[in-house]
Structures are given as structure tokens and as C-alpha cells.
Image (spheres, rainbow, N blue to C red):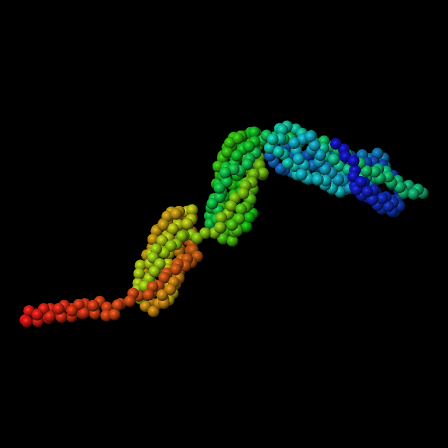
Amino acid sequence: MSRQLSMRTALILASIVLLSIGGAGVGLAQSGELDAQGSPDIEVYIPNNEVTPGSETELTVQFDNDGEFIRGNEADRAYVTTARSVVTSLDADDTPITVKTGEKSIGELPESTPKEVTFNVEIPDDAEIGSHEIDVDFEYSYTSKVENAPGLRPSQTSQSRSKSKEIKIKITDDARFRVTEIDSTLRVGEDGDITGEIENVGGEDATNAEVQFPTDAENLFPQETAVAVGDIEAGESAEFRIPIEVGSEAEAVPKRFDLPVSFRDENGIRQTDDDPEFLADIGPERDTFVVEAVNRTITAGSGTTFEVTFTNNREETLTDIEPKLFTDSPFSSSSDEGFVESLDPGESETVRFDLSASGSATAKTYPVTLDVRYQNSEGESRITDSYRLPVEVLEPEESGGLGSLGTIAMLVVSLLAVGGGYVWYRGQ
């Protein structure tokens, strides 16, 4: 469909023509005899015209100028066959295709240099399968005739044109994919997985499919960047799992990832669907262990067995768990290390330490510190940050005067007095 030049475009082209005439006139006067006539002849091509429903993709349109040279010296044909100020757009009216890109400028288009222009287009899920014709509209200016003969004033004729060429876009029902059922166990500072399903929403079967994870996100380190998922028939789904290590500097935010799918089509040709994407959460950093003190009090001037429960807070089995207790005044410990062979996710075990409080300790709450060395499921040795636990120091109980020995002595004296009184009474 041909379109009329806008007033603004016409003014711009008119200015270009005037400038070209002035500039060319000087050039012609200096270059000697010149007599040429012709025009550009532009054709458009689309190297890959296949698109799929439910996608947004790029269409590359090629412009080639095979100019028409009517008369003159062959060396002068560029004067009259070059298209200048070329502007183009796509018109997809009466088709299910939506063009997302507006007008684009190509600039100058000589005969010897084809040019490419890329347009973004969107194809809805319910687009009709088959071929659809869209128009490539373009407009340009050119010099149709130039003369510079001895004894004559140099002259040239400039014109502008608007044209439209049809190209065919084929909407195919090839295998195409979307990501569903996403679940993420990713957390800052931990190894985790992204699991989900890849569904073939196209009309053809896909064989030997694999999902790819080409992320360049900082602080995310995929352990696998390509995972085979096998054959996926039209309308069917396949599960996938991608193991990822999340660095300690990562942010606990949702992230969007691409998940291209590589597969073989029904002709055995390897294809790639680059459109699938998904959103996954990265959870905040958490402690490796949940650490709780079973007994939190101790009497000044005494000792106790300080019991601490350790619970595995990770999604993996941890082994060779070695907690160590660190104390400052008024506390001390003669046995400050423990050992747990292994803990499954969510499993707990209590470790016992010796803890003493000096007799001069003021009655109040003090902290004790623990850290834990362990091995993760990959056999890597790690050490946790320090855990601080509160321990309350209590004052010693009052002795009650003479204490237990004084009480016994008083009891003996009382008994003797009672016995003596009885003897005296019998003597009377």
C-alpha cells in the first residue's frame, strides 16, 4: 500500500534537493563534461520470513538498488541511480501481525551496497497459520538527469518517489515452548535449584530437546548451563532442574531469566526457540544452623553443663559438625568443643559443654559465643558466622545464719537440755 509523503517529510526532501542542486552545480562546473539520465530501482527481500504464534521477534528486510541507467557515460551512472534520504516502514494491516517498530531511516542507497533494516513484530497466540502479505513502504529522493556540456550552464533534475513492495510472512505451527510450574530454592550464599516444566505449545513434536541457561547475572553461578529434557510431543511437558550457586553478595530479589530451548524438528533439523523466559525468587540469607540454649542460667561461683541444640537449617545433609564455645569473663570452660557426625535437613541434636561462672560475677545476663565448622553435601569445609547466646548469672542462695552445721549443733544442745530436765524431774 503506497503512502503519501507527510508535509514535514516533503519539506525535508525539498531542502535536500535544493542543497543537492547547489552542491552538484559547483561539482559539475569543475568536473568537465557530464550528461547522464536514470533512476534508482529498489527491491526488497526478507531472508527469513517464518514466525510462530505467541512470539515477539525481529524481521530483517533487505533493500537492494539495481538502478536503471538510461543514457550517458557508464562512469557517471552513480549520479542518477543513487537513492538518497531513504525512509521505510512496515504496513501489516489486515493481518494478525502487529508491527512494533515505526519508520526507520536508511540514508543513502547506492547500487553497490544493499542495506538491511530490522523491525520488531508481535504474533498473537491465536494467529491464523499460513502466509500473510505485508507492505514495505519506502520513500526517497534522487537525481534523474544531470547535464554539464561545454558552453552550457550545468543543470540537474531532482525527484522524489514513494513506493510499496509486498513481502510474504509465513506463520508456522512449529514446536514452541513456554515455562510453567517454576519453583526456586535459591538463597543468598547457598546452593539451590530452579525446577519447572517446559511445555510444547506448538503443533509439531520436538525431539532431543534441552533447556539452556545462559545467564550473565552477577553472583549467580549455574552448575549446568544446558540440561537435556528429551522428547516433548505437541501439547506435552517435560520437567527440568537447574542447579545454581548463589554468591553471598547477591541480592534477595526476584529475577527474570531466559530459557532457550534447543530441539530437533520433524525433519530432524536442529532448531532453537529463544522466547521462553521465567521469573524466580532469590531468598534472603539464612543461618546454617538454628542454635538454641537449653539451659540459660548459672549461679555465680558454680559450674554447670551448658546444653545447646543445633538444627540443620539447610536443604542438604551436613556432616563433620564441630561446634566450639568461646567464653569471656566471668565465664570459663574446661570442655568447649563438641562433635556431631551428621544432620539431615531439619534434624536436631544437643551438644553439651562445661561452663563455670566466677564467684565475683555480678548477677546479670552475659553473652557466650559459638561458631560451627562443618562439611556441606559437596564435601566442602565451611565455617559459620558466630552465634551469640545469652546466659543469665544468678546470685548464690543465702546460707541462713549458722548454716547446716550450726543448725545441727543447736538441735543437739536442745535435745541435751530436754534430756537433762527430764532426769532432774525424775530425781525430784
**Rendered view: 343 above or below 159:** below
Compared with residue 428, is residue 175 higher up or lower down, i.e. above or below?
Answer: above
Q: Identify the residue at the far front of this view.
A: 428
Name the spot of residue 37 as percent of width and height, x first.
85, 36
In the image, taking residue 151 as reference, residue 286 lies left or right, namely left
Q: Residue at x 34, y 69 (%)?
A: 360
Q: Is residue 424 left or right of residue 135?
A: left
Report the residue at 28% width, 67% height from top. 398
Kindly tell me whether residue 201 is visible in this rendering: yes
Q: Residue furthest right?
A: 151
Q: Is residue 188 left or right of residue 156?
A: left
Q: Quadrant of residue 370?
A: bottom left
Looking at the rendering, which quadrant does residue 124 occupy? top right
* 56, 265: nearer the viewer: 56
Give how far across and how far down residue 66 sits, in percent.
Answer: 77, 35
Quick one: 229 or 131, which is closer to the camera? Answer: 131
Q: Residue at x 11, y 70 (%)?
A: 421
